[in-house]
Image: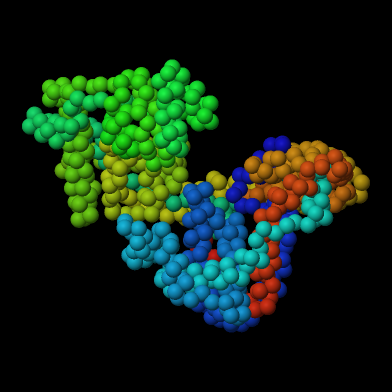
Amino acid sequence: MFSFFRRFFQSKIGLPIFLAFLGLMALAFVASDLGNTNFGGVTNTDRMAVVGGEAIPISDLTVSANNALAQVRQRNPTLTMPEFIAEGSLDEVVKQMIDRFAVGQYGKDYGLRAGENLVNSEILQIQAFQGLTGQFDQQAYLAAIGQRGLTDATFRRDLAIDLIEQQLLRSAVASPQLPEKVARQYAALVLEKRKGEIALIPSAAFAPAGNPSESQLTAWYNDNRAQFIRPERRTLRFAVLGTDTLKVNAAPTQAEIAERFKRDAAKYQASESRIVSSFVVPTEDAAKALAARIRAGASLEAVAREANFTASRSPARTREAMASATSFAFAQAAFKASEGGVVDPAQGTLGWYVARVDTIQRAPARTLAQVTPELTEQLTTEKRAAAIADLTSEIEAEIDGGTALAEVAKAYGLKVETTPALLADGRAFGQPQVQIVPQLAPLLSTAFQMEESEPQLAQIEAEQFVIFEVARVDEARAAPLAEVREGAIAGWKRSQGAVLAKQAADRIMAKVRAGTPLAAAMAAENKPGFEREAINLERRELLASQRQRIAPPLVLLFSMAEGTVKSLEGPRGLGWYVVALEDISTLPLDQEPNLVTQTRQQLGTALSDEYRAQAAAAMRKSLGVTRNEPAIAAVRKRLSGEQ
């Protein structure tokens, strides 16, 4: 699509119409929440909402928002809380919290319970709460929930709600079937084709030439600080312990080599192993008869095949290994036979063996002198591993005891290095050309959870370790106006131009509705920089590009009625889109016989989610929900850094 679509995605803020379109295609019907009303004068600031008489603590909102942001950061490590809120995600967190409490309270009202024993049994099964022995560890449990900002009481409460929800809704929403008539309606949408035009009326075309006054710029910046949020940065100090720095004496002595030779003397004695082809028959008489045929000159494989058995060839085995794999009697018989000879039938666990010795491999005894190079390498590896383990344990003990990284590095002759300020994805802030030190890449997620000046030791490879610490934390916050002054001035100009661009878009739409072609209506404005693109697109082409974000003007085009024209605001004051839809046509559904079946399968999961959402909406309405909007707004401001 044309260039100004791409510019739309310079913002991380999604448009409601985009979400609405995806919701339409995923069967996410909008359910009205009739119970969500304001507190009407109640001034309690310790609760976020009241659901059926049960209060949701306002502190839970902060914890839930932080946990939700942490999950999103697994895909987008540099996302900040203000950006998270600007995308509307905090509103979704509030809704999910209310829904959870509503489902839990509704279940309790109808006699469903999650008793203490049931909650305990669920906790005991969670692997994150188990210690090294595989058993529940109280300290691991408290540490894990503490990292999420939860207490034992709140975690148990939330777990009980989950268990009640399973009892109440699991069977109701499991594997629903989308009715064929509904599936046909959605399948028909895929075959829809729309023809129209999309134009961009850029704010830059109407932006003032002069700069704003200081008061104007400051006021605009304060209202748009979220556009200038800098993500959290961390500066790390580290020292690498590699093969060049891990200097340990691992050479074995002659006495150690001799001792190991003595300990493993059986390995170096003369040995014999045999490769045997065999098959198993049920009775001794059958085994003897078949063995006689093989001795008479028939092939073992042919005899096995004629008797409806399958012969197999074993790897080379010693007498002991063969006895373990088959039976003692068979191993004894196999080691009495000559090479190429037929083994006397012997009984095993599954029947009687018919076998032939294919190959006999004999290894002579080896002397101490002969195995010294092998033992030297083996002992060197073992001693080096033990020495490195002792050294790293010693270093870790010093770190745990409070010794500073610089002191540890000095004591062991290590070089301490400092990174530039790093983002959570490893990029150097403001220095795109700087590459992160490879040894630190796997440690970033840990580093962004550590406190300052608390060094840790981590193993990177077999013989490579890193001692690292957080030297400085720069919290995510808006940059000072002085540092982003040029960007702020450009933003102010765009915002001023956006007002006039909206007026121009309204004039253009009025003319198009009156019958003037879009191109002529744009030309009448006599402004540079306007862009226009003709669209002739099937919905299936749009859906095929879902791996990439669909441009919201296109989403709007596929949501409009035929013959209408609408406007859509671009992000960050970019301008206004004018979208004119000329024609809608649909291919016959009969030409796509498999499309209805595919639609039913693809929308099955969405239907389950829809049933759950509808059930939650009905429960909210039944219980009654009262939201404390002032308290929610206060949390929003605090998390956004506005207060």
Q: Nearer the viewer, residue 117 or 621?
A: 117
Q: Nearer the viewer, residue 134 or 298?
A: 298
Left or right: 185 as drawn, with respect to 55:
right
Is 136 placed above or below 39 here?
above
- Identify which residue is drawn at 44% across, 68% down: 121
Q: Is residue 103 above or below residue 23?
A: below
Q: Picture coordinates of residue 94 (x, y %)?
A: 58, 67
Q: Position of residue 76 (x, y in %)?
A: 52, 48
Q: Can you give x and y, in whole percent of width and height, for residue 219 in the image?
A: 57, 59
Is 428 located above or below residue 130 in the figure?
Answer: above
In the rendered structure, the answer to whether residue 65 lies left or right of residue 7 reads: left
Pick whichever, 319 or 380, lies toward us: 319
Name the spot of residue 522 as percent of width and height, x first: 82, 42
Figure quadrant of residue 44: bottom right
Whether residue 296 is visible here, answered yes or no, is: yes
Tell me the residue at 79%/40% (across/down).
Answer: 538
Q: Can residue 576 be seen?
A: no
Q: Where, quadrant-wise, is the N terminus in this rendering?
A: top right
* Residue for point 61% across, 44% down: 10
